[in-house]
Image (tube, rainbow, N blue to C red):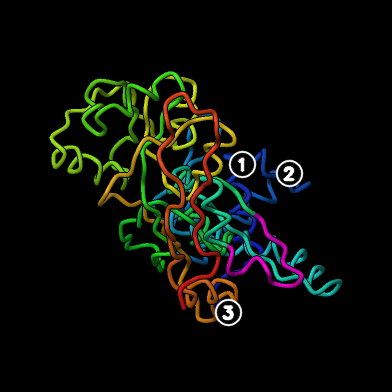
Amino acid sequence: MSLDFSYRHLYYFWVVAREGGISRAAARLGMAVQTVSAQVRELERELGHALLRPAGRGVALTEAGEAAMHQADLIFQLGEQLPERVRGAATQPVRRLQVGVGGGVPKLVTWRLLQPVLDEPDLRLKVVEQPVEDLLADLALHRLDLALVDRAPAPHPGLRLRTWLLGVSPVAWYAPPALREAAQADFPRSLAQVPVLLPLPPATMRQQLDPWFEREGVRPRIAGEFEDSALLKTFGARGLGVFPAAEWVEEDLLARYGVCRIGGCAGVDEPFHAVCAERSVPHPLVARLMASGPVEAGPVLSEPCRAGSARRRASPRASARPRR
């Protein structure tokens, strides 16, 4: 631990920066404004640089202050977790796993990808859904142990992250009842006639679908493009258009949305990646997922719906066991 400055002074600076002003920080700390201001000035003297500058009725960070704030975030946000971690470890044997999920990862896929660790005794699982940029920031701050995303994030010089492929699902086409017959007729060329819904670029599935259309000689009649996969399925199920989806969620699509499988999409797969922060001692459950290898896709057991048939088809089921 460095003794070149006071961590108490750093804490006062951190509160001032988060509150955006010395008066608001003093009110939160229950201290006099003059005391807080003096503590921050003392930190600036110890570090040899101005950290704050006036901004309207408050303060803003200088460039040196930005650097100090980044480090203070790491220190004190981890410190805020300390009492809870200590109490939890002392009262009960709990194995915590905090997972963030990107919006492009379907809910049932999340369950499938985490299956190798879900049998852990005393597991306490916390799952949140966030934009990928927020997931990566929370990984860097150790607020999350693992993130599940539908495409590998680009390397970032300020983040020490590890990414690996956790599973790959084949993709198929689905249609609401009103579009079933038209979509089935001469599939996939029918996709030039019926309305089609697609994921927005740069989604990995979209990057594969565009070449697939070219190979099939189809110019799709695009009726909508969506960033969120759940919205795409919802609008498709309500009749806006035919849409592609990972076969891993077919059971949920049939049961919840009442759509019908139209046909496969050879050569198009949807990969799912896991991301974690580089640590000298990795989280044991994250290490188990790393060692388990990609989840197998498994065969498709169902056939396309027949026009006029009300019989519900069997859904594809992937092997629950990861490839060893």
Looking at the picture, does residue 60 appear above or below residue 140? above
The residue that label 3 is drawn on is 1
The residue that label 1 is drawn on is 19
Extent of the magenta region: 115-126
Label 2, label 3: how far apart the Cα atoms are: 27 Å
Q: Residue at x 20, y 43 (%)?
A: 212
Q: Residue at x 64, y 64 (%)?
A: 97
- In the rendered image, residue 121 lying in the magenta stretch gets the answer yes
Across and down, in percent, residue 306 comes to 42, 31
What amino acid is found at the position of numbered circle 3 in the picture?
Met
Circles 1, 2 touching at the beta carbon (< 8 Å):
yes
Across and down, in percent, residue 274 comes to 45, 62
Work out whether residue 7 or residue 153 is closer to the camera in this orientation and state it.
Answer: 153
What amino acid is found at the position of numbered circle 2 in the picture?
Arg
Dot 2 lies on which element? helix
Across and down, in percent, residue 217 comes to 13, 35
